[in-house]
Amino acid sequence: MLQKVEICGVDTAGLPLLTAAESESLMRRLKEGDAAARERFIVGNMRLVLSLVKRFWAKNVNADDVFQAGCIGLLKAIDNFNMEIGVRFSTYAVPMILGEIKRFLRDGNSLRVSRSIRDTAYKVLKTREELEAADKEATIEKIAAAMKVREKEVVYALDAISDPVSLFEPVYNKSGDTLLLMDQIYDEKNNDEVWTEQAALSEALARLGERERKILILRYYEGKTQTEISEEVGISQAQVSRLEKNAISAMRSSIASDA
């Protein structure tokens, strides 16, 4: 996003800059219904939108979407601005543009946090500030004690309001070598040893007869009982039990011989 020049089809590097006199003149004309003046005024203030959008570069959101939300705030500011109030347009527009961007980021977040959890989180933050102001270490334990809640409620509330981080977020960059967050995450369920075991199991399963293979798939992959399998396969439950044990034994022997 930091290198992005064209946003929403707009070449931000070539955006014009209005003087104070030009801005005032265009504003008066657009308020009188001059469409050309309105368009020129909008384009002339896109630099203001861009400067505010840059504050949100670290939010891992699409630059086009944020810029578009900022432009909506700009249009609302233009429509509601009163030249008689005696303030510069930019002074009036900045809060409206920021408000529209923040509303987009809040409403566009796929992770919905309930009001009660947000309230708890804000109380946690306030309690932490109070403890720190009193030169006390604001640990989870002390925050929970001050709030008279369980420690896990404090942890849960803080986690709920934390911004999600992309696995592709760079955490280190030097001489062109970028280390991503996902490079530092270890997955115990999908390491090399697990993949090897899964490959061996799949190969051993493939060596079984069709009926034995089906029984194991129904039993251990689909979680069905031996009675349910007997009805589906058309044999007795005792036969299912015997075939299941024989199949497992055969697979163990197959894996052991390949080891």
Image (cartoon, rainbow, N blue to C red):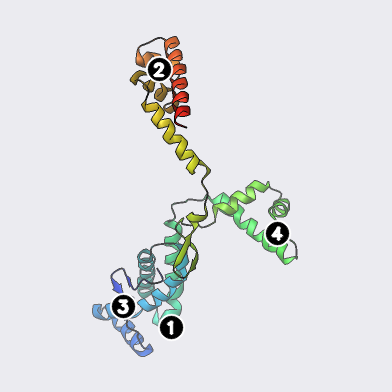
Percent from the top left, x then y, of residue 157? 59, 51
Mark 1 closeness class: few <14, some 14–19, many ≥20 residues within 10 Å: few
Q: In the rendered image, which residue does mark 2 sit on?
A: 229
Question: Residue type at mark 1?
Answer: Arg
**Which quadrant of the view contains residue 23?**
bottom left
Residue at the spot x=39%, y=69% of the render? 70
Question: Residue type at mark 4?
Answer: Ala
Disc nearest the viewer among 4 and 1: 4
Mark 3 closeness class: few <14, some 14–19, many ≥20 residues within 10 Å: some
Cα–Cα gap, marks 1 and 2: 78 Å
Q: In the rendered image, which residue does mark 4 sit on?
A: 138
Disc nearest the viewer among 2 and 4: 2
Q: In the rendered image, which residue does mark 3 sit on?
A: 43
Question: Residue type at mark 2?
Answer: Ile
Picture layout, residue 85 above or below residue 174: below
Is 144 on the left-hand or right-hand side of 213?
A: right
Residue at the spot x=35%, y=15% of the render? 233
Residue 47 vs residue 167, the one in the foreground: 167
Of labels 4 and 3, earlier in sequence is 3
Of labels 2 and 4, earlier in sequence is 4
Mark 4 closeness class: few <14, some 14–19, many ≥20 residues within 10 Å: some
Of labels 1 and 2, earlier in sequence is 1
Cα–Cα gap, marks 4 and 3: 48 Å
Q: In the rendered image, which residue does mark 1 sit on?
A: 88
Residue at the spot x=40%, y=14% of the render? 230
Of labels 4 and 1, earlier in sequence is 1
Disc nearest the viewer among 4 and 3: 4
Percent from the top left, x then y, of residue 196? 45, 38
Of labels 3 and 2, earlier in sequence is 3
Residue 221 vs residue 211, the one in the foreground: 211
Q: Secondary structure at mark 2?
A: helix
